């Protein structure tokens, strides 16, 4: 990750599993004792993850400072039941409830509006903003992340050229598309997005910074990037576009605002965040509300 003082290491918990026959015997705790020792010995400032098993994690010292929530842009009504809890999905199938009355109609209407979204973006009058689909990671990516924390504060995942190349372009599991935003010839942001096996489009990463000597604001850049992701994912056959909103970091709030203006819905459904800060060094670890994190954290199947 990176903040205004520079780049630092954190560790992301990827998978935890104990055979059901051996649960409740502190095996999880003992495995984590080894991992923690390794992490603290190697200058890792915190271990973080997302989990439904908060009880197991808080028992071994993790904090639960927040939850992920979801944003969703419907492109096809068949995508909707997967997003709902069981009760709402059952109501929807029976034809009762708020969602069945509005969501299915909205999904059809939204698909029709996609081209209008692009049109309104194209006519926004920012001739010096260009969006380009890249086939390899941009050299300047690390600088964008440095500028990002200097402009927006807090901390974010440090994605330099090498990280993005590994994570997105050379990823053996999922091929994401990567659209970069240039103001003049200066890289000012990007969006990465992928189509899942469930035919759902996933926003993997979004970032934007102020451009020098230009009236192209990060808000304009994010609007252009999200519009492009919707258009491309629709062309690829996506049933909808899903993304994350996680914290009150000012950029996370900006993405949410722009997404809602474009027609995304915001669902308060997601997983708990768990964080274990390096003991005695809490002051070095930002409060979780100052984090800006996206699905770019892992080279996994989730986009
Ligand atoms: C999480 C896990 C590794 C913890 O193992 P453990 O230390 O032996 O602890 P236990 O299995 O006794 O679980 C500790 C508590 O967490 C709860 N818990 C475990 N997994 C849970 C889950 N997926 N969702 C909600 N609660 C969960 C247990 O019910 C238990 O609560 P209790 O003491 O009130 O019964 C183990 O439960 C597991 O493998 N779970 C399935 C995989 C999983 O859910 N991993 C987390 C995803 S990141």
Image (cartoon, rainbow, N blue to C red):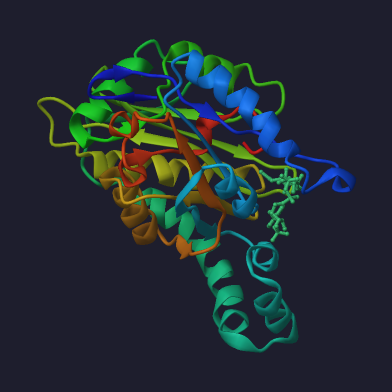
Q: Looking at this rendering, what residue extends furthest in the left direction?
A: 213
Give the position of the C terminus as an image quadrant.
Answer: top right
Of the pair 264 and 144, the residue shown nearer to us: 144
Residue 269 image offset from top left, x and y in percent: 54, 62
Q: Is residue 247 left or right of residue 200?
A: left
Query: In this view of the protein, which residue sits in the foreground, 22 or 48?
Result: 22
Does 46 sit above or below residue 140? below
Residue 286 sits in quarter? top left
Residue at image position (26%, 46%) is 250
Q: Residue at x 61, y 24 (%)?
A: 35
Q: Residue at x 9, y 26 (%)?
A: 213
* Residue displayed at 33% across by 47% down: 289
**How far across and how far down the image is residue 101, in percent?**
58, 84
Q: Please identify the quarter of the rendering in which residue 301 is found.
A: top right
Give x and y (percent) for residue 234. 59, 48
Please, is residue 8 above or below residue 108 in the view? above
Relative to 157, 30 lies left or right: right
């Amino acid at each position: 990750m990176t903040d205004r003082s520079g780049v630092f290491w954190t560790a992301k918990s990827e998978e935890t599993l104990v055979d059901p026959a051996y649960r409740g015997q502190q095996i999880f705790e003992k495995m984590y004792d080894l991992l923690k020792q390794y992490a603290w010995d190697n200058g890792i400032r915190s271990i973080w993850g997302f989990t439904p098993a908060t009880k197991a994690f808080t028992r071994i010292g993790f904090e639960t400072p927040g939850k992920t929530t979801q944003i969703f842009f419907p492109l096809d009504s068949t995508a909707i039941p997967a997003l709902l809890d069981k009760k709402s999905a059952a109501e929807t199938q029976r034809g009762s409830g708020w969602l069945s009355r509005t969501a299915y109609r909205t999904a059809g209407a939204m698909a029709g509006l996609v081209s209008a979204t692009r049109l309104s973006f194209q006519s926004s009058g920012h001739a010096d903003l260009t969006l380009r689909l890249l086939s390899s990671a941009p050299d300047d990516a690390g600088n964008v992340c440095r500028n990002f924390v200097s402009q927006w504060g807090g901390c974010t995942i440090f994605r330099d050229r090498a990280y993005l190349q590994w994570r997105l372009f050379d990823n053996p599991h999922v091929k994401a598309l990567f659209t970069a935003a240039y103001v003049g010839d200066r890289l000012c942001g990007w969006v990465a997005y992928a189509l899942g096996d469930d035919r759902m489009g996933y926003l993997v990463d979004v970032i934007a910074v102020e451009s020098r000597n230009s009236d192209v604001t990060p808000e304009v850049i994010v609007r252009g990037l999200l519009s492009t992701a919707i258009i491309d994912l629709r062309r690829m056959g996506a049933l909808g576009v899903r993304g994350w909103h996680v914290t009150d970091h000012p950029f996370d709030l900006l993405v949410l605002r722009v997404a809602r203006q474009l027609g995304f819905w915001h669902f308060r459904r997601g997983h708990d965040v768990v964080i274990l800060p390096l003991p005695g060094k809490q002051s070095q670890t930002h409060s979780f509300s100052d984090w800006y994190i996206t699905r770019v954290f892992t080279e996994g199947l989730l986009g």
